[in-house]
Structures are given as structure tokens and as C-alpha cells.
Image (tube, rainbow, N blue to C red):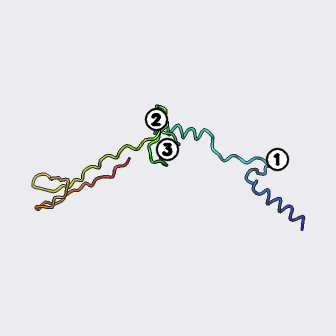
Amino acid sequence: MVSRRVPLATLVLLLPLGGCYYLTSTGFGTAPKPLPDPYTMMHFEAFSLMGTHKSIVDHIYGWITDKDCSSPRAERGEAYCREWVGKPPPPPQIYCYSTLARPTCYAQPYNEGNDRLIGFVPPSTPMR
């Protein structure tokens, strides 16, 4: 009985190390590294700086604080984070009615007379 418990205990203790080594034809060898090339993150960082003038950390920190953060702007002596530029005013609503000659358009609904509504342009939701 003791002889069976010792190999079982050894197997249980060595089981967590199973991902670190694997058995080859010549014995034990180290497992291949699952991590990508270290230059991959540098490439992502360079593409982010070229495309948006912000680093990846700037994007993450700006997302957390809900501000516009940029390390190149901070290197120029400006503030690292600033509030987002105000949203532009929404375009006006337009209500167009058919008349004798050309359609007549108003900023508010026109419910007088015998005019027929032929078009309505609602304001769009601006995005930052």
C-alpha cells in the first residue's frame, strides 16, 4: 500500500509543473513560449501614435477618466488631460409642407391651413 501512495503523491505534486516541461524523445524539454514577439506591442504603440497622436496608455487613461489625454501634447508643455471639446449644437428640425409653387419649410410644425406635410428632418445625434 505504501508503494502505491508514494508514486501517487509524487504525481500530484508534479502535476502543476506539467505545463512547464514536456517529454521529448531525448528526455524532458522546456515548453514553447506562448507569448508573442516583444516587438509586437511596440508596433501597436507606434501605429497608435501615428494614427491618433496618443499612446495606448493615453487611450486607457482617457477612457477611465473620460477626458482627452495625450502624452505628445504633455511633452509640448500643454496639459496631459483636458476636457472633451463641447458638442456642436444639433441641426434644426425642418418640417416641409407642399404649397402652390414650391415646398415651404418651417422650424416648427405648421398645423394651419390645408398644407400637407411632405418631409421631416429630425436632428441628428452628434458624436464626439
Q: Would residue 82 appear left or right of 43 to someone viewing this image? A: left
Name, please, the residue furthest toward the top: 76
Give the distance between the C-alpha atoms of the residues marked 2 and 1, in whole angstroms. 56 Å
Give the distance between the C-alpha atoms of the residues marked 1 and 3, in whole angstroms. 48 Å
Q: Pointers 1 and 3 in contact (CB under 8 A)?
A: no
Mark found first going from the N terminus, 1 or 3? 1
The residue pinned by badge 3 equals 59
Under mark 1, the amino acid is Thr
At which x and y percent is residue 61? 50, 45
Q: Would residue 26 appear left or right of 85 to someone viewing this image? A: right
Under mark 2, the amino acid is Arg
Q: Pointers 2 and 1 in contact (CB under 8 A)?
A: no
Q: Quadrant of the N terminus?
A: bottom right
Residue at point 34% right, 49% down? Answer: 126
Identify the image quadrant of residue 41. Answer: top right
Mark found first going from the N terminus, 2 or 3? 3
The circle drawn on residue 73 is 2
The residue pinned by badge 1 equals 26
Q: Residues within 10 Å of mark 3 (few under 14, many from 20)?
A: some
